[in-house]
Image (cartoon, coloured by chain):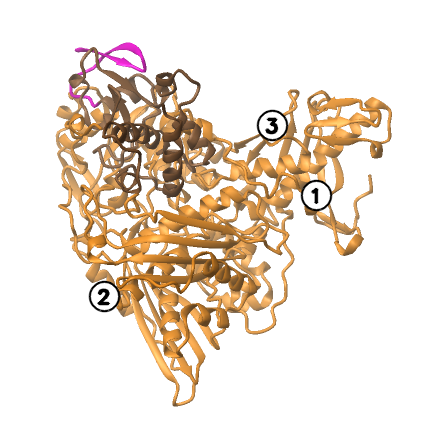
């Protein structure tokens, strides 16, 4: 069985599993990291959204063998550490706006929001209504309005 | 303490008279014998007084689903208990299920209010299946707070009283000289004793009956104040555990290969050897719902399912399609009565069709089962855990007490979790394999084999003469709704307790018709009003999707209300205000009209729509603005179904006494997103005996690109002193206002919902294999 090594939430991890197992199952079923959720397995619901090297990606659609030993995977569990706080400003905004209902999609929503804010800033802008319209993450409880408010508020807290 | 009145058999004992005109009842409860303070109340005591209504009321005005569920418990229900812990916290196991609707938060607020304890010191967990509660452990019909509010307050008040008594003994004062504040008893000289210190001292060696007065609502300091959810931090840090996140020893990932047609069954797995040799695969087993595989990871289960060669039996709807089912419904439609109205009266008649919709939550159907030789333990999100326990015991050939059922917080329900499909399946698979399993449905299985909102037609005939509406008849015909989750049993056992006139009105109806009759209130003075349901075809996997009959019934009704307004030459708002039956509805209409700028000028291709709903002892109104201009309808977002855009929504709700306004607003916001999807985008297509949709890229639930950039929800002050239902109250008026706005913006009244059902805009995923391949190109879409 091949050894798969990558960096997870700041620490190198090694797992014995075949190359073609998707990263989501390596995280959830083998490493017990359950923040990223399963909602479709085909990269459409975005409930598993996490970061790879600081950018949003969906581990349900990436083979573990495609990760290199220097690739840094960050899940919701590792997000606060990226800013050296107990909570990332986006998580603070989520709590302040009382966004979650069932909460199942929210780890993915927050990871997507952080990446989106960084992306528009790389493009030299702040987040706009049409940027918010492009967020693909499904919330079946329909918390979309509060998500929009929280993304804008969380962005203000991001350095 | 006053002795209980021996002549009363139930909880309520005496009126304490009307000081300042306000009558307060005292209630009986218990201090349970033990070593720490446990206070209890009977869950059945909530029985709100019913007001008389002057003329020709529809059934729900006299006695609605809320009353029925509240009364259901009367002969059978047992105690709920609140325990005071040494650390000064209070614990309560709620015999209901949290699925996102916020009842653990609001319940903690109720306890904190009556106990005088900071809300964060109240720990609310979910009770496992308690068979002795019989019908009183069902989460549905927006009834949780309605039915638990008073008993929980009584138990809390008794606990506070016992703590005060203990403090009085300890400090040597009369109880009247003590007060409580935020979990501390304070004496006249400023002495303090924390609830934690008093917990054991307040315990009683034997169970005692105690009577208690509840706090005057005027004095509430916690109930009615907006409060954030108790589990928000857990949710946003990924620490909130759902069923699939639990670690149960040996419970490996397990999934099923399902039939290519609806409810088809497996004959045999032809390539078992090959499947067992696949990487990570441990066991396979054929059960009645498909072929199960247990593996090291879910990914390896998916690979195994895709490799399975299974011989199938056909399903009960093989060869059927939307058109054949619609034809069957049409055949079952009852003729509309010819109303006895003057010859010159004008008749308005319309017929509407509502397609099948999936009630799936984002968390797929899932359960953990550990079935042994002589016992079984189950973990799952279950709204009717007692029935799940019975069904599982039956499926396993065990007695009910051999099956332990743990209730786990659910990742959404929307009616889906009324059924224990995944839990029963997991138990069967675990038994067949002789191993613990963590069973999950693939997303593709949810719209194809999971629970659906039934297909419905709705016909309306109304008559108008000289500006007056003389009659309004509505006849719904529906594919059968499955009520086997227990609500049906509640009705049969309870209907005799309803006021006699209600018994006469609904006597002889089936479960579905009874629920329909108990929930539908048109809310308008339109002369002779009747709303009835007829059902046909029980071959589908259906269920009470959030707000079950109301969205369709309301969409049809409000579209016709707009037509009637036009007929008599009145503005839609003015027409509704003139005919609204209740002040609650009128106030809700006035609020959204004012806040949402009703009647403001809009460009060609944009319009407003307004609608009401009356249910769960409350009233709602919704005003939306929609944009159907081509540049909006055809806006491009990658792989997105865009279409008409609601650009603004204004919502008002009177939900009776509100525990947590912030939670109530959240429920209305979610209900709005559901209503929007029901009217514009979300449905499943039946073709050749199976449903085409297989994931969220086919099933168009509301997304960010559909949601209005502006949504405002106003919680109206209510004159009611008891809470109404909230979890489902947001859907119907939302769906109807969007439909009305769409009709006004396009100039054409839509008659089939959702409006985009007509064309299938995707390539259906394969039926064999039954699940799609997991993509490998995820790194191409990073951002």
Question: Whole-Å distance between the Cαs marked 1 and 3?
Answer: 20 Å
The tint chain B carries is orange
Residue in the picture at 76% in, 38% down: B210
Q: Secondary structure at mark 2?
A: helix
The tint chain A carries is brown
Inspect the magenta stretch and tell me whether residue A11 lies in it: yes
In the image, residue A151 lies at what x, y percent? 36, 34
Respond whether the residues carrying marks 1 and 3 are from the same subunit. yes
Sequence-first disc among 1 and 2: 1
Please give left or right for residue A87 compared with residue B310 in the image: right
Viewer-side residue, A132 vs B36: A132
Q: Which residues make up the magenta segment?
A: A1-22
Viewer-side residue, B287 vs B619: B619
The residue identified by callout 1 is: B219
Q: Is residue A3 visible?
A: yes
Q: Quadrant of the N terminus of chain A?
A: top left
Sequence-first disc among 2 and 3: 3
- Residue A63 quadrant: top left
In the image, residue B583 lies at what x, y percent? 56, 64
**Residue furthest front as drawn:** A124
Q: Which mark is residue B660?
A: none
Residue in the picture at 20% in, 11% down: A69
Inspect the magenta stretch and tell me whether residue B748 lies in it: no
Q: Which mark is residue B121?
A: 3
Q: How many labels sit on residues?
A: 3
Q: Is residue B403 visible?
A: no
Q: Which mark is residue B327?
A: 2
């Amino acid at each position: 069985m091949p050894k798969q090594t990558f960096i997870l939430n700041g620490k190198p991890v090694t797992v014995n599993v075949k190359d073609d197992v998707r990263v989501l199952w390596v995280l959830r079923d083998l490493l017990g990291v359950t923040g990223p959720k399963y909602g479709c397995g085909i990269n459409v619901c975005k409930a598993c959204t996490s970061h790879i090297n600081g950018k949003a990606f969906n581990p349900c659609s990436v083979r573990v063998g495609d990760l290199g030993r220097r690739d840094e995977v960050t899940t919701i569990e590792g997000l606060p550490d990226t800013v050296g706080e107990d909570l990332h400003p986006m998580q603070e905004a989520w709590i302040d706006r009382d966004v979650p209902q069932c909460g199942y999609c929210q780890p993915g929503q927050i990871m997507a929001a952080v990446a989106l804010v960084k992306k528009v800033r790389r493009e030299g802008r702040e987040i706009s209504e049409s940027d918010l319209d492009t967020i693909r993450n499904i919330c079946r409880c329909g918390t979309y309005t509060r998500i929009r408010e929280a993304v804008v508020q969380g962005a203000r807290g991001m350095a | 303490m006053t002795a209980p009145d021996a002549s009363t058999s139930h909880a309520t004992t005496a009126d304490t008279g009307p000081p300042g005109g306000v009558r307060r009842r005292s209630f009986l409860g218990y201090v349970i014998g033990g070593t720490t303070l446990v206070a209890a109340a009977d869950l059945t005591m909530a029985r709100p007084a019913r007001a008389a209504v002057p003329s020709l009321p529809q059934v729900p005005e006299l006695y609605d689903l809320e009353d029925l569920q509240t009364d259901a418990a009367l002969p059978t229900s047992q105690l709920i208990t609140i325990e005071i812990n040494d650390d000064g916290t209070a614990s309560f196991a709620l015999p209901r299920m949290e699925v996102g609707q916020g009842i653990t938060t609001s319940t903690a607020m109720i306890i904190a209010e009556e106990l005088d304890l900071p809300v964060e010191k109240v720990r609310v967990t979910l009770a496992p299946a308690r068979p002795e509660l019989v019908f009183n452990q069902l989460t549905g019909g927006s009834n949780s707070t309605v039915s638990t509010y008073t008993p929980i307050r009584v138990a809390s008040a008794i606990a506070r009283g016992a703590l005060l008594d203990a403090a009085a003994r300890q400090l040597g004062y009369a109880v009247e000289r003590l007060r409580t504040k935020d979990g501390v008893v304070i004496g006249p000289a400023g002495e303090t004793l924390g609830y934690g210190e008093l917990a054991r001292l307040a315990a009683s060696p034997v169970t005692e009956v105690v009577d208690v007065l509840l706090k005057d609502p005027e004095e509430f300091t916690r109930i009615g104040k907006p409060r954030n959810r108790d589990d928000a931090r857990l949710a946003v840090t990924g620490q909130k555990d759902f069923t699939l996140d639990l670690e149960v020893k040996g419970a490996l990932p397990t999934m099923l290969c399902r039939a290519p047609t609806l409810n088809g069954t497996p004959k045999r797995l032809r390539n078992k050897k090959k499947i067992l040799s696949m990487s990570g695969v441990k066991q396979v087993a054929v059960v009645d719902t498909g072929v199960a595989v247990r593996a090291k990871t879910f990914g390896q289960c998916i690979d195994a399912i895709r490799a399975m060669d299974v011989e199938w039996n056909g399903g009960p709807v093989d060869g059927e399609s939307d058109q054949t089912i619609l034809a069957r419904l049409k055949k079952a439609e009852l003729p509309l009565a010819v109303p006895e109205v003057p010859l010159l009266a004008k008749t308005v008649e319309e017929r509407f069709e509502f397609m099948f919709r999936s009630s799936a939550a984002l968390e797929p159907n899932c359960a953990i089962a550990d079935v042994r030789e002589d016992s079984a333990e189950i973990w799952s999100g279950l709204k009717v855990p007692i029935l799940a326990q019975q069904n599982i015991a039956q499926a396993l050939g065990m007695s009910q007490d051999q099956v332990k059922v743990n209730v786990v917080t659910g990742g959404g329900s929307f009616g889906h979790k009324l059924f224990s499909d995944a839990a029963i399946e997991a138990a069967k698979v675990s038994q067949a394999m002789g191993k613990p399993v963590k069973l999950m449905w693939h997303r593709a299985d949810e719209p194809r084999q999971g629970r659906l909102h039934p297909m419905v037609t709705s016909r309306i005939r109304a008559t108008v003469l000289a500006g007056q509406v003389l009659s309004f008849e509505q006849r719904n015909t529906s594919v059968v709704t499955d009520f086997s989750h227990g609500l049906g049993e509640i009705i049969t056992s309870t209907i005799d307790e309803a006021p006699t006139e209600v018994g006469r009105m609904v006597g002889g109806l089936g479960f579905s018709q009874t629920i329909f009759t108990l929930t539908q209130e048109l809310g308008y003075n339109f002369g002779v009003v009747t709303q009835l349901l007829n059902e046909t075809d029980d071959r589908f996997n259906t269920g009470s999707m959030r707000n079950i009959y109301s969205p369709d019934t309301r969409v049809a009704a409000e579209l016709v209300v707009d037509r009637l307004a036009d007929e008599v030459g009145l503005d839609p708002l003015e027409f509704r205000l003139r005919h609204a039956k209740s002040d609650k509805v009128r106030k809700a209409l006035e609020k959204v009209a004012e806040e949402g700028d009703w009647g403001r000028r809009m460009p060609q291709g944009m319009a407003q729509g307004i609608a009401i709903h009356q249910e769960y002892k409350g009233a709602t109104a919704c005003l939306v603005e929609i944009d159907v201009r081509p540049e909006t309808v055809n806006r491009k977002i990658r792989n997105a179904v865009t279409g008409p855009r609601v650009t603004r929504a204004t919502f008002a709700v009177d939900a009776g006494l509100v525990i947590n306004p912030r939670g109530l607003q959240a429920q209305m916001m979610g209900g709005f997103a559901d209503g929007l999807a029901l009217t514009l985008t979300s449905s499943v297509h039946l073709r050749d005996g199976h449903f085409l949709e297989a994931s969220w890229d086919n099933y168009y639930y509301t997304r960010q690109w559909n949601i209005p950039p502006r949504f405002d929800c106003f919680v109206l002050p209510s004159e009611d002193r008891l809470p109404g239902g909230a979890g489902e109250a947001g859907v119907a008026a939302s769906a109807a206002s969007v439909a009305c706005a769409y009709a006004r913006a396009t100039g054409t009244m839509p008659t089939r919902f959702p409006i985009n059902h007509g064309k299938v805009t995707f390539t259906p995923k394969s039926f064999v294999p039954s699940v799609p391949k997991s993509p490998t190109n995820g790194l191409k879409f990073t951002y």
